[in-house]
Image (cartoon, rainbow, N blue to C red):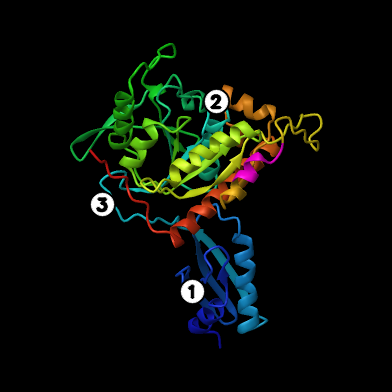
Amino acid sequence: MITQESVLAALSHVEEPDLGKDLVTLNMIQDIHINGIEVAFTVVLTTPACPLKDLIERACINAIHHFIDKQAVVKVNLTAKVTANRKDNKNVLAEVKNIIVVASGKGGVGKSTVAVNLALSLAQQGATVGLLDADIYGPSIPIMLGIKHERPKMTTIIGKGMIVPILKYGISAMSIGLLIEDDQAVIWRGPMASSALKQFINDVYWGALDYLILDMPPGTGDVHLTIAQSVPITGAVIVSTPQAVAAADAQKAIMMFKQQQINVPILGVVENMAYFTPAELPNNKYYIFGSGGAKQLAEQYGLPYLGEIPLVQSIREGGDNGIPAGLDSDAIAREAFEKLAKNVARNVAMRNANIAPTKVVEIVE
């Protein structure tokens, strides 16, 4: 006779590959139902974007057959609950589980393109996602999402006036570019830009999010410190292109987050514009900017390599037209961003399981 106890005992032999513990210990098994030789249960994954869900499902079925009954009819329901690891007072972004910054050491490496399509791919895989354009001087998110002519509305939350982000493609987005005209330039000193960014954090009603993606400005300046002092960052994604000069600047971004007083975990490095593939020759790869610079950088610092994004026309067109490449039928671009999103989500789950919460940087007067 199959019992709930025997099912749990069998599934205790199935290990979550990333977290290194069995599914029962991790409380990932729920809703066990038994009817004769029919067994059904739910596995709660750490993220909807889990790249190992098929492997886990097969392992569960094999465990029931091996430890209980080869004739058992097993139905595994897969669901997900994105993990969080926040122990701050949660006065800021209280309903946001994970805050991810997308950064680079220099401009022109496609950081905003990566941020937009990362957010989009996470949302397409079932997560609730917000996107904050933290590049006050050069906001590009409104163009890339096709919302540059929209203006956010106001609402009242518990007696406080709050800005409502623009919802597009399943992403809640906010940018200084939504509050100014196209031909306006933001000519502010550092403290004013930092003040505006704090307002986007404190006075925008983000609601409940699995991930809030912050598209950071290039470099290592005031805005980066403001973010580190304002919110508990789950981790950073570093964007580089293959050539040595870009990797050298990305190295500076890595060292900034590794500073003892900042100490933000780095989720990994992604190589953008890794190779060129012409539409008429989809199987050809041309390494215009060299090869492997970002991967070598990741290996140098013992960081995860999150993957490579190709240089294809659809990505550029998507950014200009407000229809991100993650929505495009071009399999090369879409699959690259889907893989990136899965790797980021996977590393967030591992980070939350194995590393203490990130502390907000204290301001020393």
Badge 2 is on which residue?
322
Q: Which residues are magenta?
A: 291-297
Q: Answer with left or right where residue 293 lies relative to residue 137.
A: right
Where's residue 33, x and y in %?
50, 75
Tell me the crowding category of disc 2: few under 14, some 14 to 19, or many 20 or more residues within 10 angstroms, Cα based.
some
Which quadrant of the figure has residue 361? top left
Q: Relative to 321, does residue 73 appear above or below in the rendering?
A: below
Callout 3, which amino acid?
A: Asn
Task: Tell me if I can see residue 129 in this picture.
Answer: no
Where's residue 360, x and y in %?
32, 47
Task: Tell me if I can see residue 286 in this picture.
Answer: yes
Label placed on residue 24 = 1
Residue 249 counted in the magenta span: no
Q: Earlier in the sequence, mark 1 or mark 2?
A: 1
Which quadrant of the figure has residue 294? top right
What SS does tag 3 mark? loop
Q: Earlier in the sequence, mark 3 or mark 2?
A: 3
